């Protein structure tokens, strides 16, 4: 499955200090089978309650409302057919006063169950705060592509692994989150756990009686790369049956920022793996979100700058800063405070990365800014503030740049290639001169986690590029994207 959306918009807005005028929309999909073995999907839509406006409703209480559009397409090669659509309002809990709103700005959740035959599908959801006071606020859009594969009632199989917020016995069959005797509340952040202490999961198992005559064992564990975390491993004994569920949780409070896999394995009588299901998740620890200590070691490298120059360079650190650093930078009043801030900022990077020194990192940063201003300056726009400039400042110079300024029938565009960035390899960034007037090349697509992902970027460079319908943010791989749902659904999809 591929998911593109504002996903982890909340996460990376925090980490990368981006700003957004829209609500934070989350979309996830899991596949299950009914009692007859026919597949169906559960679609989970949620809105971050802290990103909408709350107004008094007819009960004289405060409530937030997001309007949601839902589109389900059947894909057939380059074509797609709309097979289901919906338009509804998603409401928050009611609150007595604005203080309670602050305390109770929890996600608005929605679940939809849809039986589907074999095939490939795309779900597009759009959400907008109907009470937004921001006139130019654009709707947030999430896109999820998935495939329903053929299954056999004679074979053992797993459902998708669902990450859940809570799991409790229930008899309330009218509850939309009721299933198999339980209320199951999805944890809908597409597998990202930000400062979370616990991971909960739910999975269904079908026709274990076709694989085993009596009891069997299911092993659940967390893996980091190819390493099994044995302290995060447990084994369950289950009776062979036509249907069963497995739930559980792991304490992940001590796991550091990284990508992990939740692995569920069925073991045969020789303790060998007979069947296996996996789902990736990412843990983010905001370890840099602590107050900055003023620098004690002042070697004088910042003393030569004027206060105006110091303020300018501090602004150029935005792409590298977290929210606490941004807040602190805005509170600086004197030249000495700004000097101390720069020392503390770079000292933290020296300690965190375990290499380099303040003078080396500072020199590298200022050269990036100078290069970006020389190469990417656009009309009334400094080079470092453009999309290419931001990419240069944040990730450094690419290993290769492919420039296409005058291809027949295409808008001017560039492809930047990085051999490796953090844990990823073979990364691309695609920039396009969409207006052909200011020289501002906008980022259309990237395969880098946390950046714009738009599998249709080739279409935008061609005839429909001028419509300026483009993806907005990808957060995950599990990757989410904000995509204009008015985009022609029959457009082709690229291979990146």
Image (cartoon, rainbow, N blue to C red):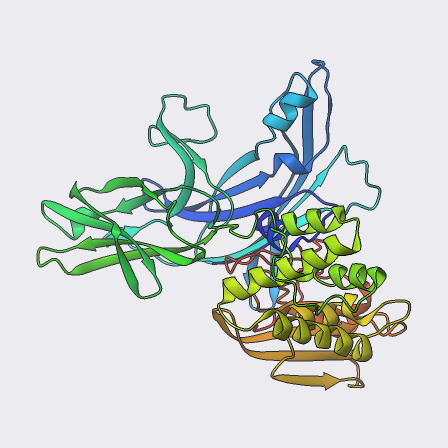
The mark tally for this picture is 0
Q: Quadrant of the C terminus?
A: bottom right
> Would you say 222 lies left or right of 316 here?
left
Which of the 4 image quarters holds residue 36? top left
> Would you say 130 lies left or right of 296 here?
right
**Residue at image coords 8%, 55%:** 269
Q: State the image coordinates of residue 342 (x, y, percent, origin top left).
A: 68, 60
Which of the 4 image quarters holds residue 308? bottom right
**Residue at image coords 87%, 74%:** 436
Q: State the image coordinates of residue 31 (x, y, percent, origin top left).
A: 41, 49
Extreme-top residue of the structure = 59
Residue 225 visible from this viewpoint: yes
Q: Pick the residue in front: 495 or 341.
A: 341
**Residue at image coords 71%, 41%:** 128
Image height of 415 relative to 454, above or below: below
Image height of 399 relative to 377, above or below: below
Image height of 408 relative to 490, above or below: below
Q: State the image coordinates of residue 409 (x, y, percent, origin top left).
A: 79, 81
Image height of 99 relative to 386, above or below: above
Q: State the image coordinates of residue 48 (x, y, percent, origin top left).
A: 61, 38
> Would you say 335 lies left or right of 142 here?
right
Residue 458 visible from this viewpoint: no
Q: Pick the residue in front: 402 or 203.
A: 402
């Amino acid at each position: 499955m591929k998911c593109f959306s504002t996903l982890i918009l909340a996460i990376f807005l925090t980490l990368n200090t981006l700003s957004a005028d829209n609500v934070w929309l989350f979309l996830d999909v899991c596949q299950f089978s009914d009692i007859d073995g026919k597949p169906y999907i559960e679609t989970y839509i949620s809105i971050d309650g802290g990103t909408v406006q709350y107004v008094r409703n007819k009960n004289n209480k405060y409530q937030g409302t997001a309007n949601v559009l839902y589109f389900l397409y059947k894909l057939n090669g380059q074509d797609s057919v709309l097979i289901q659509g919906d338009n509804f309002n998603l409401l928050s809990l009611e609150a007595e006063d604005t203080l309670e709103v602050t305390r109770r700005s929890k996600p608005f959740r929605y679940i939809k169950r849809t039986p589907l035959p074999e095939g490939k599908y795309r779900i597009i959801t759009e959400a907008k705060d109907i009470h937004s006071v921001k006139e130019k606020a654009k709707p947030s859009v999430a896109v999820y592509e998935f495939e329903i594969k053929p299954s056999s009632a004679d074979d053992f199989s797993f459902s998708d692994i669902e990450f859940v917020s809570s799991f409790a016995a229930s008899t309330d069959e009218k509850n939309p989150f009721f299933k198999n005797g339980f209320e199951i509340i999805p944890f809908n952040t597409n597998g990202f756990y930000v400062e979370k202490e616990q991971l909960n999961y739910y999975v269904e198992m079908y026709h274990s009686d076709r694989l085993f005559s009596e009891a069997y064992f299911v092993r659940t564990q967390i893996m980091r790369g190819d390493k099994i975390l044995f302290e995060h491993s447990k084994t369950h004994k289950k009776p062979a049956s036509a249907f069963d569920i497995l739930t559980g949780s792991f304490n992940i409070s001590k796991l550091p920022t990284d990508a992990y896999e939740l692995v569920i394995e069925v073991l045969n009588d020789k303790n060998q793996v007979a069947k296996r299901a996996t789902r990736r998740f990412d843990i983010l620890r905001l370890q840099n979100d602590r107050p900055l200590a003023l620098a004690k070691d002042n070697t004088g490298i910042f003393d030569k700058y004027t206060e105006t120059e110091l303020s300018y360079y501090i602004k150029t650190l935005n792409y590298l800063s977290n929210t606490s650093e941004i807040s602190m930078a805005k509170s600086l009043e004197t030249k000495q405070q700004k000097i101390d801030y720069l020392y503390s900022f770079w000292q933290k990077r020296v300690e965190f990365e375990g290499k380099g020194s303040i003078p080396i990192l500072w020199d590298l940063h200022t050269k990036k800014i100078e290069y970006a201003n020389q190469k990417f300056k656009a009309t009334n726009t400094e080079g470092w503030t453009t999309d290419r400039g931001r990419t240069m400042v944040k990730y450094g110079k690419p290993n290769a740049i492919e420039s296409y300024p005058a291809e027949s029938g295409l808008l001017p565009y560039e492809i930047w290639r990085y051999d490796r960035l953090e844990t990823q390899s073979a990364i691309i960034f695609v920039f396009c001169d969409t207006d052909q007037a200011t020289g501002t090349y906008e980022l259309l697509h990237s395969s880098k986690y946390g950046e714009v992902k738009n599998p249709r970027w080739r279409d935008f460079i061609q005839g429909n590029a001028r419509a300026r319908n483009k993806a907005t943010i990808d957060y995950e791989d599990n990757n989410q994207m904000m995509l204009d749902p008015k985009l022609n659904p029959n457009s082709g999809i690229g291979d990146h």
